[in-house]
Amino acid sequence: MTFKPARLLVALLAVAILPALAKDISTANAQNLAVVNGKAIPSSRADLFVKTVVAQSQGQQTDSPELRARIKDELINREILMQEADKLGLGTRVEVKNEMEVARQSIVIRALVNDFVKKNPVSDAEIKNEYDKFKAQASDKEYHARHILVEKEEDAKAIIAKLKGGAKFDELAKQSKDTGSAANGGDLDWASPNSFVKPFSDAMVALKKGEMTDTPVKSQFGFHIIKLEDIRAAKIPTLDEIKSKISESLEQKKLQTYQEELRKKAKIQ
């Protein structure tokens, strides 16, 4: 089992900050960063920019006077451009309004998601339970296999005959339907049995090192010829090594369930 967080709502979470800042977010007592043609730029807007830049830099950028000076200059430029766009009435165009609404939705949905995650945190007990299931399903061995995938059984039988006659597996693998492995001689690299569909996995683990399937192996993808290159003991990661991945995966599952529940309640015509 590999913990790959479902990318649910990723597109909704990838929020562009710029449209969110198109309007003043100042309060009556907010300190102004600058005033352009009589319109104030609140310092809170710069604070939001700084926070975003620092977060997105992944440690490469820190809050500093130099960064704030660049952001101040950028915000002044933006205000000048916004004022000119308003004079031209560009904000009233249908396509612009549509883009602004999409940006608004993204920002509000992000707030909803953050609120849900905060109120429904993943517990250590949930993480431990998921890890225990992972360990129970994990194989104690990893297999290095090659395969050739074809559409028809007769084609697979013809390939097996050629291989038994001395043909090289990696050469015949070039005709495989699995284009990802075909260029590498059918090489599937090291993997646990549960990484493959059951018919393939069952046939693979029945082989000994260096052996090849005598008959085509049928799966939903077609017919496989499998060659087992090697077997080794599998290294099962510790809980600490994959705790963050499990947590993220469980968080995404909760979000998916939440979204599905809301959709069931919605009246869609």
Image (tube, rainbow, N blue to C red):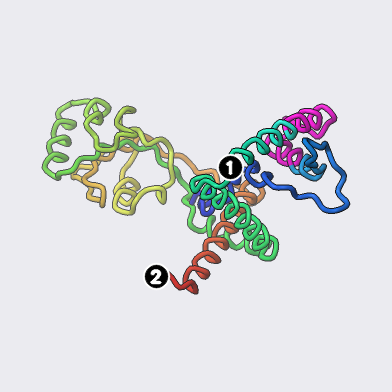
From the viewer's perspective, tell me whether residue 257 is left or right of residue 112.
left
| Residue annotated with mark 2 | 269
Read off the magenta span. Answer: 49-74
Determine which of the numbered discs, if any, sits on residue 89 in the image: 1
Q: Is residue 3 placed above or below 129 in the rendered structure? A: above
Residue 228: image location, x then y, percent: 33, 38
Of labels 2 and 1, earlier in sequence is: 1
In front: 36, or 226?
36
Residue at 32 percent across and 36 percent down: it is 146
**Badge 1: few (under 14), some or many (20 or more) residues near its Cα, within 10 Å?**
few
Q: Is residue 92 placed above or below 211 in the rendered structure? A: below
In front: 96, or 161?
96
Instruction: Single out the mark in the foreground, 2 or 1.
Output: 1
Distance in Å between CA atoms under marks 2 and 1: 35 Å
In front: 90, or 237?
90
Main SS of residues in magenta? helix
From the viewer's perspective, tell me whether residue 57 is left or right of residue 94.
right
Question: Which amino acid is tagged 2?
Answer: Gln
Residue 217 seen in the figure: yes
